Image (cartoon, rainbow, N blue to C red):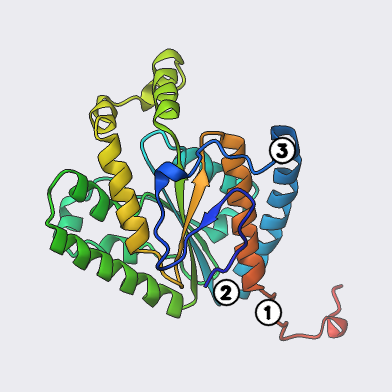
């Protein structure tokens, strides 16, 4: 279970305390400056690499990082930021796209359960099982009763993971509608970003308010003691990177991974 700390620009949700996204400033800096953040990020990356190595060596528990956001919310950039300097042997990255025919032949949690991080690993999920309660709700493809049942299944699934040694961090990257417009326009103007532009994003943008309500419903319903949501102000990418790194480092420090005791006495070993 992640306890974490608040007051550094990230909102750690609590069961029974519903959030309203309109009341959370996506441009929040919590007193940080971009230059100071750059220095802190460098130190946090070093600390994260140390902790990841210990977690990998210990090989008893794992960390799962779920990243959700609106289109252009910065999921790819946030994950790149977290992966910087990590040992790829201890990282499991999964990008959940539209379900395949095989995945649709199973229950909606089948494809995510098999992607859960193995012992010693840091799992990074770009989108997740939450797509199966967000998109169908917004597009009217699921009844409210079926939606509630899926949320119950998600809460039970996440509790199962935590009971088996998985610490779960669920990040929602909170951006403004104005910032999304800027990022979409940047994709049209910059050749190295044009490949990311999708006309379907414009159709989804028209449903902005519906998605905001859906995210509020999902966050409020699927915030539990063992797997709370973390709301990240993400209009400023440097702020997003800072608070996510701080949160992941804090979570690993709370886990206190230890290197395994050697089964040999190095003093008795002679290398000729």
Above or below, 257 relative to 73: below
Q: Which residue is mark 3?
A: 38
Question: Which numbered circle lies on residue 239?
Answer: none
Where residue 49 appears, as percent x and y from the top left, is 68, 56
Q: Residue at x 44, y 22 (%)?
A: 182
Distance from label 2 to label 1 (Cα)? 8 Å
54 vs 176, nearest the viewer: 176
Question: Which numbered circle lies on residue 260?
Answer: 1
The outermost residue toward the top is 189
Q: Which residue is mark 2?
A: 59
In front: label 2 or label 3: 3
**Quadrant of residue 32 in the image?**
top right
Distance from label 3 to label 1 (Cα)? 33 Å
34 vs 121, nearest the viewer: 34
Could you tell which of marks 3 and 1 lies nearer the N-terminus?
Answer: 3
Q: Residue at x 49, y 76 (%)?
A: 165
Number of residues whose C-alpha sits closer than 10 Å to that of mark 1, classed few (under 14), some (14–19) or many (20 or more) = few
CB atoms at circles 2 and 1 under 8 Å apart?
Answer: yes
Distance from label 2 to label 3 (Cα)? 31 Å
Where residue 90 appears, as percent x and y from the top left, is 56, 60
In front: label 3 or label 1: 3
Where residue 113 appears, as percent x and y from the top left, is 33, 66
Above or below, 109 relative to 174: below
């Amino acid at each position: 279970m992640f306890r974490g700390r608040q007051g550094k620009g990230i909102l750690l949700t609590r069961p029974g305390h519903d959030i309203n996204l309109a009341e959370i400033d996506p441009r929040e800096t919590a007193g940080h400056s971009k230059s100071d953040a750059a220095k802190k990020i460098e130190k946090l990356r070093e600390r994260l690499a140390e902790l990841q190595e210990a977690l990998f060596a210990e090989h008893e528990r794992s960390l799962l990082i779920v990243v959700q956001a609106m289109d252009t919310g910065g999921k790819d950039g946030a994950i790149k930021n977290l992966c910087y300097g990590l040992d790829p042997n201890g990282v499991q990255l999964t990008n959940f796209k539209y379900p395949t025919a095989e995945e649709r032949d199973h229950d909606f949690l089948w494809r995510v359960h098999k992607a859960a991080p193995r012992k010693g690993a840091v799992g990074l999920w770009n989108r997740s099982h939450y797509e199966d309660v967000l998109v169908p709700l917004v597009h009217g493809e699921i009844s409210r009763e079926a939606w509630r049942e899926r949320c119950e299944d998600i809460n039970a699934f996440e509790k199962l993971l935590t009971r088996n040694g998985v610490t779960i961090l669920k990040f929602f990257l909170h951006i403004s509608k104005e910032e999304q417009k800027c990022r979409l326009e940047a994709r049209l103007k910059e050749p190295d970003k044009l490949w990311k532009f999708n006309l379907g994003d414009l159709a989804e943008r028209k449903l902005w308010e519906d998605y905001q309500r859906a995210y509020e419903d999902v966050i409020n319903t699927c915030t539990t003691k063992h797997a709370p949501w973390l709301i990240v102000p993400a209009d400023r990418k440097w702020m997003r990177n800072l608070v996510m790194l701080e949160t992941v480092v804090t979570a690993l420090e709370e886990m206190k991974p230890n290197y395994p005791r050697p089964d040999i006495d190095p003093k008795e070993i002679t290398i000729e």
